[in-house]
Image (cartoon, rainbow, N blue to C red):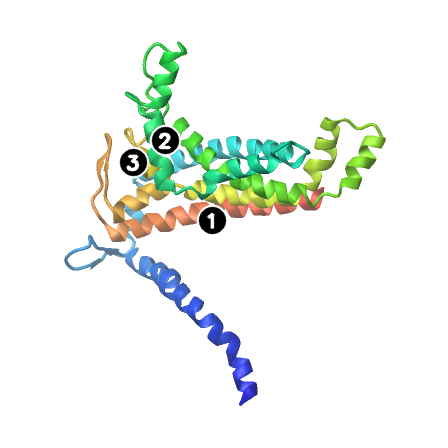
Amino acid sequence: MDKIKLRLEPYTMTLPSLLLTLVLGVYPILWAIRYMFYEYHGFGQEQFVGLANFERLLHDEMFWSSVGNTFVYAAGKLLLTIPLSLVLAVMLNGALRGRHIFRAIFFLPTIISTAVMSVVFYVVFNSYNGILNQLLIKYGVVSESVEWLGPRYAMLTMIMVAAWGAIGNYMLLFLAGLQNIPRDIYESAMIDGANRYQQFTRITLPLLGPVMQMIIMLAITVSLKGYESILLITEGGPFGKTNVMYLYVYQFFFPISTSGGGQIMQDFGYGSATGFAAALIVGLITGVYFYASRRMSKIY
């Protein structure tokens, strides 16, 4: 009897987590897969339409425009976030006075609610009475308000907001990698006459390779799936300039009125199809990167 209890104990301990995973993870995925082949608007009867949702998807200009916006958003965020987080990690890994306080300050945006952060940045970047415009006009940098959330600068603004929220997280991961590099290597390099730049390029970057690979893959997936701050600040506007893939999918389940873009009608079936396509695109891109990075690590 005791042996049976010992064998069942691991299963009973993991049962609550397994049930939650099935109910909140597996069941919604199966539900979405089923509805990809149906037309259902949340009321009335559902209608089986076969592959009609995917045929509609192929000719959906708004979806493919959101895919392009997603690539721009993700690329901009990566190019801004990864170098800055690496530089901050290197600076805060040294003998800098008060470095623990600076680490906490830079990591703080990571734990702030996205909703709170988005409201604050909306007040900062508001085109008419935003804090940033008031400061720029006050000190003579610009003569009139800049439309930070207008068609010209909206995507750039969203990239900066996303980078602000992500730098602290990646900085912490880089710090963990830096602290695993033995100090003896740097001391030997200094004895051989290597300067700081040579130490960084010949020691730090190569030994950070595995950590860098993991961070970039994580950053790619998060950037391609991100939409929360865009939803709360611009709602995909103006005129769809910041409408990214997962925000477009979101609108078919929870319709919102976008500035200049109208309102998308609720459609669970088509929303499931677009969600599947978006997940497939993210999976393909991360898979290609993972394969390429593995090949490069074997070469070097």
Percent x, y of residue 147: 32, 20
| Residue in the picture at 75% in, 43% down | 182
Q: Secondary structure at mark 1?
A: helix
User: In this rendering, is residue 104 above or below 143?
Assistant: below
Q: Are circles 2 and 3 on residues that touch, CB within 8 Å? A: no
Q: Are circles 1 and 2 on residues that touch, CB within 8 Å? A: no
Foreground disc of the pair 2, 3: 2
Q: Which residue is mark 1?
A: 283
Label drawn at residue 115: none
Q: Foreground: 1 or 265? A: 1
**Is residue 228 in view?**
no
Point out the tag, 2 or 3, that comes first from the N-terminus. Answer: 2
| Residue in the picture at 42% in, 44% down | 225
Percent x, y of residue 151: 32, 24
Q: Foreground: 285 or 18? A: 18
Measured Cα–Cα span from mark 2 to mark 3: 14 Å
Q: Which residue is mark 3?
A: 235
**Residue type highlighted by circle 3:** Glu
Q: Residue furthest left?
A: 44
Percent x, y of residue 163: 47, 34
Label drawn at residue 121: 2
**Residue type highlighted by circle 2:** Phe
User: In this rendering, is residue 73 above or below 253?
Assistant: above
Name the side, left or right, on which 128 lies relative to 77. Answer: left
Point out the tag, 1 or 2, that comes first from the N-terminus. Answer: 2
Name the side, left or right, on which 58 lies relative to 172. Answer: left
